[in-house]
Amino acid sequence: MASPFFERGLTWLSYFIVALFTWLLLSSAISWYRLRHIPGPFFGKFSYLWLAYITITGTQHDHLVNLNRSYGPIVRVGPNEVLVDDPDLIRKVSSTRNTYTKGNWYLGGKFNPYHDPMFQITDPAQHDRVKAKLSPAYSGRDAPNLEAVVNRQVGSLIQLIKEKYTSSQGDYRPMEGTKVTRLFALDVISNLSLGQEFGYLKADSDFHGIVKALNEHLLVMTLATDIPWLRNLIFSPMFLKLFGPTENDTKGIGPLMKVANTIVRERYAPEADEQHDMLGSFKRHGLRLEECQAESLFMFLAGSETTATVIRVILLYIVASPHIYQRLRQEITEAISEGRASSPITDVESRQLPYLQAVIYEGIRIRPATTGMFFKDVPAGGETMHGKYIPAGTSIGINASSLLRSEALFGPDPQVFRPERYLEVDKEISAQMKRDVEIVFGYGRWMCAGKPIAFMELNKVIFELLRVFDFQLVEPEVAMKSESYMVFHDQSLILRVTEADHK
């Protein structure tokens, strides 16, 4: 016979289960009711199961591309979350005159429990104060060596390919393009953010294991960013203090954190010489040591894979499209022969090459560097969008994957990689299409500070690679394997590289 204590325990357990089930049922019903007039996937109306599913399966981009086409310009994807793909709405939400604020989505990917980089600061006034300290460096006004840094790394990339991956008759040396583009982006961002070249290209290796660490944690990081209760747990200060990366770790983000923090500490030492790079600019404009450590680490982690993603997408699509490849090669050859391209090409010169610019914008459009939703919170009083009332406190996010495949914005064939779309229309329409593409970098108050640097990298690396080399896909039927989380995890872009002949 069971003891009275055991029976009472079962009774209380039953009460707890019933209470928990009732609470879940009521909270789901309340969540559903609040935004019941917004269409969307069934499970997204009262839970985060839909967001979890597209993340766990690595298919965020594939699902987001078709989402607004299926449900309309405003789609509900969670109990309190909606996505929009209307560029005018996105600009309105991000306008400096508006009172929308960053949502807690931005706390995802937090590694430092004590200090936030600018990206993760949700208070508008505090964000603007920090941005004022960082902008002179990001714009190049206070860090005149930015272009020289990118030039050096483009040179290192070309040297690596020449020495290890250039094939000739009887000597086949396949190049894994996803790896090489990652190493290039890591070296650029280490030099920019920390003032030191880590030498990933020279070693032909990610010897800090950064890519491996990020790939291993990409699924969990994306889930924890998109799902509030998981985000509130994993990226809480207490959790990070107990389980987050530290300088004492031997794997994961810890080793990079140690190197980055050590470099910043040395630069902030009283005896350190003043340097005119990004780190020096941060220091001169009043960024404290701990703030600079958080900012530099975030730049390194966020600014490398996003740029590398666009570089390899452009390479994949131009090599797979002979007429695009030949037209771009012709523009490059003519620019060289007519003296319109220095060696290496300058950023200003590259912006005068219309087909190169069209290729770069089309590369960003066809598959954005990130599928991040960048949720903002609706201010008091709510908002009416496309005839639908959005209550205050609702999180409104960007669906860039859908926006960039819009027929209304980019013509009847947005699924096709076709740079000519920017050149066959008048200048005003072309400029508007480019502005719509640039929404992937954010807008207004919340625009990505690294946007000018990203374009500089793309302008230079695409031109110089095609100045020096010819590329051919190996096994084009399986050209590149990709999974999409908040960023893309690409593998197996195998290329045969030969020296270019610009005759």
Image (tube, rainbow, N blue to C red):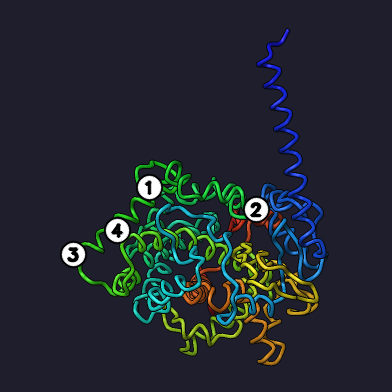
Disc count in the image?
4
Which-is-in-front pick, marks 3 and 1? 3
Which-is-in-front pick, marks 3 and 2? 3
Q: Residues within 10 Å of mark 2 (few under 14, many from 20)?
A: some
Residue furthest out toward the left: 271
Who comes first in sequence, dot 4 or dot 3?
A: 4
Q: Secondary structure at mark 1?
A: helix
Q: Residue at x 30, y 70 (%)?
A: 283
Three-letter amino acid code of the residue under disc 3: Pro
Residue 457: x and y in percent read: 48, 72
Who comes first in sequence, dot 1 or dot 2?
A: 1
As measured in the structure, the alpha-carbon distance from the residue carrying label 2 to the one carrying label 4 is 34 Å
Relative height, residue 143 to residue 35 (above, below): below
Residues under numbered marks 3 and 1 in contact, where contact means CB atoms less than 8 Å apart: no
The dot on residue 295 is none
What residue is shown with label 3? 270
What residue is shown with label 4? 263
The dot on residue 255 is 1
Which-is-in-front pick, marks 4 and 3? 3
Residue 13: x and y in percent read: 69, 27
Which-is-in-front pick, marks 1 and 2? 1
Who comes first in sequence, dot 2 or dot 4?
A: 4
* Frontmost residue, 102 versus 440: 102
As measured in the structure, the alpha-carbon distance from the residue carrying label 1 to the one carrying label 2 is 26 Å
Who comes first in sequence, dot 3 or dot 2?
A: 3
Residue 273: x and y in percent read: 20, 69
Q: Secondary structure at mark 2?
A: strand
As measured in the structure, the alpha-carbon distance from the residue carrying label 3 to the one carrying label 2 is 46 Å
Q: Quadrant of the N terminus?
A: top right
As measured in the structure, the alpha-carbon distance from the residue carrying label 4 to the one carrying label 1 is 13 Å
